[in-house]
Image (cartoon, rainbow, N blue to C red):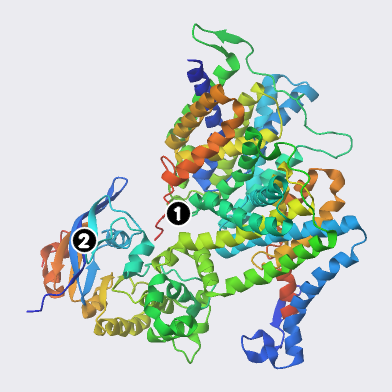
Amino acid sequence: MDVFVYGMVNSMIFFLMAVGFSFVYGISRLPNFAHGALYVLTGFITWSFINKTGLPYWPSVIISLIIVSMTGVVIYQFVMIRVRGMPISEIIVSFAIGLGILEGLRLQGIGDFKGFIGPGYVLPPFIDGVVSTSWVMIDLQRLLIIAVGLLILCLMWIFTHYHRIGMALKATAQNERAALMLGINSDRMANIALGIGSALAGMAAISVMPLGNINCESGYNVLTNAIAVCVIGGLGSWRGTALAALILGLSTTIMSSFGGTMWNRVLVFGIIILTLIVRPSGLFGQQKELEERV
Amino acid sequence: MNEKRKVLIKVRNVNKSFGGVVAVDNLSFELLEGEVLGVIGPNGSGKTTIVNIITGFLKPDSGEVFFMDKRLTGLSPFKVAELGVTRTFQIVRPYPSMKAYKNLIVPLWSQRARRFAGSRGGDRDAVAIDLLEEVGFERDAFVPYKLASALPLGYLKRLELARCLALRPEVIICDEVFSGLSMSEIASMLPLVEKLRMKGATLIMVEHRLRELFSVANRLLVMNFGVKIAEGEPEQVMEDERVRRAYLGEEISF
Amino acid sequence: MAGEERRKERLDRGIKARAESLYAVSSWREASYLLAPRAGLIIGLLIAPLLAPSLYWQRVIGLAGVYALLALSFDFLAERVGLVCIGGAFMIGVGGYISGGLNYYFGLPVVLTIPIGTFGGAIICTLVWLPCLPLRGIYFAVVTFMFPFLAVSVILAGGLFGGTEGLSPVAGLPNWVGIYLILTLVLVAIFGVRRLCGEDIGLVFQGIKDNDQAVLASAVNITRVKIYALFVATSIGCFAGAFVSHFFGFAGLSLFAIDFTIMPIAASIMGGPATLAGPAVGAFILAPLSELLRGFGQLRVVFYCVVLVGFILFKPEGLLNWASRRYHQFEHWVKV
């Protein structure tokens, strides 16, 4: 029973980590390798606000989400937009920016500041305390993760189905040319998508980081997990993302209860390779392997 | 009348839908050796879709495609080409960074071309230039040496055909090979198609330009909304009530 | 008209050797025009270690050679075949561990371990990256990115190959042998891969990059061709890895460091994408530069990223293309 509940939590964690990446790719076909960096960035900014400037929790969170969102937009507006359409350059530039931010956050070697290394940096959990039911003990923060994840799912669904901009985003995702012909500016859409995607990465950070501490390694972890979810579920598909998150969450929890967390990564990679061999475009993949573009 | 000609391609009950849109609806037809089959129909009637299905770029939802006795359904495009069923692309696909004759090195490098190459196989450049000359690239004007990105559409369309010819094909499926060309370009393209026909090539020509098609096609297949609405000799087919309605609309009567 | 408008006019130099015909050998002037850049590269690389101010800098040149090979491998795959591989460190790690491991556990001599590391590693890398070859789009990039991390996880989780400490000591290479080995291999690789791309199969690579649907329609099995290209590229990368383990005398987790992935890419973009020689030159510029920045620790990676993004945005043709353009053409401003 333990396994099930923690498995659900882990699935939600995977989902939260992946949704930003998946969203951006679905809308603008841009692989946002800066996703992991934005995740960690949110953590650091929030920590800085709370601890260095003494702002209370909520304002810190909101301000840092806005900052991170803006960072995503800036990345698109000043850099990515110039390489749009050249797939090789898009990947390389995105990768370089993500890596630059992540490694830069280590901030080693500038004067005396040792950078954000070490276990001392922790984000406070939103809710403290533990809930003890007859089946299992679980801390409230983890339950909160599930709540946040579901909330995001619902909000995204409503947004893309009922709000004008959300529907425009969906249109761009389905067929960029057709959307352009209808007067939807795909660059603006990509901007918005990157802003939202960054914010989603930030929300994932706020929810999940309190479980551990803030460090730069988690940036790579987040990126790998996001990619895993997207490849297994199929790039650009909501159902796929959700299902893949479920599979990964449950299987890693099961693996942890048997062998400890060290083999988790390997398990994740194993599932990825398996997916690529057996069903290459992912479970619900929209991107067909041999796309006919006549 | 005619001696029984070999059936090269058999399409049986092929269906294909995209989302809710039916592109090809229970289509069946045969292609005989040595004939030129024209496939016509209004926009969106599924012509290019069936070409993609035959050549392996798309998998049908149901139905089968055969080449002689081999099953084509589900084969990947290069295997279909390997068997000799070649195609041109409606929107031309040259390799823009290479010279025109170098474009042909790719098909000449394939297994199929190598099998047919024989002793001259080593010198692909020469074979490429000869091929281009056959399709009308003037060797004296050094046209084959121009960069593919610098060629006008008429030449690029011929390059598409040359690409098929490099594979010593059994069947060439021409996807709108006349579209986008000016009248003079068409006038120079037509003899090329004629020449191919004279040599006994088997062609499927998907076309919009009916006049040109009529001068080369033996048989016509008319599609509308994915359904075959008529098949037969060109004159017969154009008299057909349904065909007229499809092209001209319900209201017109003759 | 108010003001004077100028534009840049470029004229090709009147040297016949630039036409594709026999002029190249028709006179000393023509021949030397063509030979000079190539000779410059060869001589420059071979003299460099002799000019280095100290042993430390000689070893930097050796390391630069490693980066040069990686950059070449990346450039070949990305610009000539269309496969963007952002997992270069994986090749270094595989080559290094195989080669170092064979020496550490079985005592095989360097003469054997390096070739086995090279080609055995190439086979492993190719097999492991095989599943994403038939896919299009960013799949290849996205999957190769993860492999260095995977390898580290496997080694740590299984406590394999010495875990965090790695394997040490591994038989070393005498200093001069090592340096000239790598430099020679860099030159061989540059000219070899260029030759490969000039052959017919090179045109097929280019075709795949330009328009893979057309290649499919030309009865070519794209996946098989990509496998050839991948094998060539991973051989180069794994050789570099095998070399590293013997040049520095150990095989450890640091072989999978992100430096080995990002620096070659930066060198490639800076040096001149698609030129195959440019990336190598770029590596020989960036490696010493980054040594100067050693005091800044991980910020070196940020430096590479900045260089990379800067060049892509502002000078995407890269240094070698720029230089080659200046070599082949006059440029001057003319009044409009």
Where residue C141 appears, as percent x and y from the top left, is 57, 50
- Name the mark on residue A177: 1
In the image, residue C329 sits, relative to residue A150, either above or below, namely: below
Query: Circle 1 marks a residue in which chain?
Result: A
Mark pair 2, 1: CA separation: 33 Å
Where residue A116 appears, as percent x and y from the top left, is 77, 32
In the image, residue B230 sits, relative to residue B13, either above or below, namely: below
Asked if the residue at tag 1 contacts the one at tag 2, i.e. Cβ–Cβ closer than 8 Å, the answer is no
Query: At x 34% / y 77%, what residue is drawn?
Result: B168
Q: In which quarter of the image is residue C312?
A: bottom right
Query: Circle 2 marks a residue in which chain?
Result: B
Where residue A132 appears, as percent x and y from the top left, is 55, 7
Check disc 2 and report the residue beneath it.
B11
Outermost residue on the front side: it is: C107
Query: At x 75% / y 65%, what residue is drawn?
Result: C281
Mark 1: amino acid: Arg
Q: What element carries label 1?
A: helix
Where residue C317 appears, as percent x and y from the top left, is 68, 65
Q: Is mark 2 on a helix, strand or loop?
A: strand
